[in-house]
Amino acid sequence: MPGFEHEPLGRVVFGPGTLSRLGEVVRAVGGTRVLLVTDPGLEQAGHPQRAEAAVRAAGPEVFVFDGVKENPTEREVAAGVVFARTHSVDCIVAVGGGSSMDCAKGVNFLLTNGGRMADYKGHGKATEPMLPSVGVPTTAGTGSEAQSYALITDESTHLKMACGDKKAAFRVSILDPEVTLSQPRGVTAVTGIDAVAHAVEAFVCTRRNPLSEVYARAAFRHLEPNFARVLEHPTDLAARGAMLLGAHFAGMAIEAAMLGVCHSSANPLTAHYGITHGIAIGVMLRHVVRFNGADPATDALYRDLVGDHAGSNGRPACEVLADRIGELLAAAGLPRTLKECGVAESILPLLAEEANAQWTARFNPRPVTEADILGLYRSAW
């Protein structure tokens, strides 16, 4: 059994209607002048307005920064820092999907420690304390509220920088299933498959440990049976709650362990073609699972993860899992190949070179080379 360290990041408040408790949560962490970081697309659903009202009702002042875009870059983070300094904030609240969460963490890094996001690439490079922060996910996908990393896109390379520090983690996460009812079907699909991939990759990565396995297994048990359910019955609050918890557990698994080559191969697809992260993940995941399953020890882990789905017919667990992922993609109507996504076959070698440089590839359970990744891309194409 490998040695490991685990430091729980913060408090979790789960349940329908818990967004209304945001004000008391902010006051509990000492917030009096709050930067609310959000996505302007959420205003139609009313989530930022409800969050702002809940905080104001408890006494603190609120200043809304809604300049977040998908896959936030250093530009959005810098704008958020200027806005935060203008209003002398002492607390940060993120309301939205992974992009809002990442941008809020990025703002916290630069507001308190200065410099550029590139200075914090890696982990533990912030030397000064950071502001207390609260995360309110409106999607069941990234699990960013359960992690200490901010994924910020480098504007020069268009690749994501993983900037992590325990001080950047949210002090409190509010998981309100009612908030996720407003997710459009497409958002439910792409964020859901991303969460499934988090559970699958974290469960088998080389940094797995007994605790991360518990989180990843719990995540998969919540996500796999409810993914199709929320697509078919979007108002099913119990299924929405299971997906939200599953995504959070998967985020905890990543924090306690790591990911693998599926995420490494997805990032260049987003950088070059603007393919939504969850779509890129969905296209690549089955091929990565089959590749990893060629290692008997990893296939044994997959069998542990899929449980009863593996049956007793002697099929490799990686095939069972890959087929199940294919069923989820079909239920969601997501693309199955890179060709469907408009990716040119001629660019695959360049994508493989860039994916091989992504650090999550180093934690894949089966060691990968650039040639292996090119093979994965060709299988997916």
Image (cartoon, helix red, strand yellow):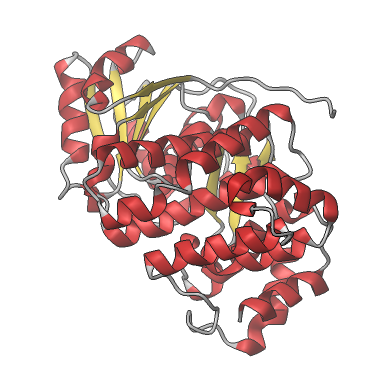
For the question of whether residue 197 can be seen, the reply is yes
Q: Can you tell which quarter of the image residue 291 is in?
A: bottom right
Quick one: 194 or 321, which is closer to the camera? 321
For this view, does 155 lie left or right of residue 373? left
Q: x, y percentage for residue 230?
A: 32, 50
Relative to 270, does residue 225 appear above or below in the rendering?
Answer: above
For this view, does 106 lie left or right of residue 119? left
For the point 74% across and 32% down, the residue is: 209
Quick one: 76 or 362, which is closer to the camera? 362
* Quarter that holds the C terminus: bottom right
Relative to 267, does residue 255 appear above or below in the rendering?
Answer: above
Q: x, y percentage for residue 43?
A: 18, 47
Quick one: 325 or 182, which is closer to the camera? 325
Relative to 25, does residue 77 appear above or below in the rendering?
Answer: below
For the question of whether residue 158 can be seen, the reply is no
Q: Can you tell which quarter of the image residue 376 is in?
A: bottom right
Q: x, y percentage for residue 37?
A: 33, 38
For the point 42% across and 59% down, the residue is: 190
* Quarter that holds the N terminus: top right
For the point 64% across and 53% down, the residue is: 310
Q: x, y percentage for residue 213?
A: 67, 34
Count of picture labels:
0
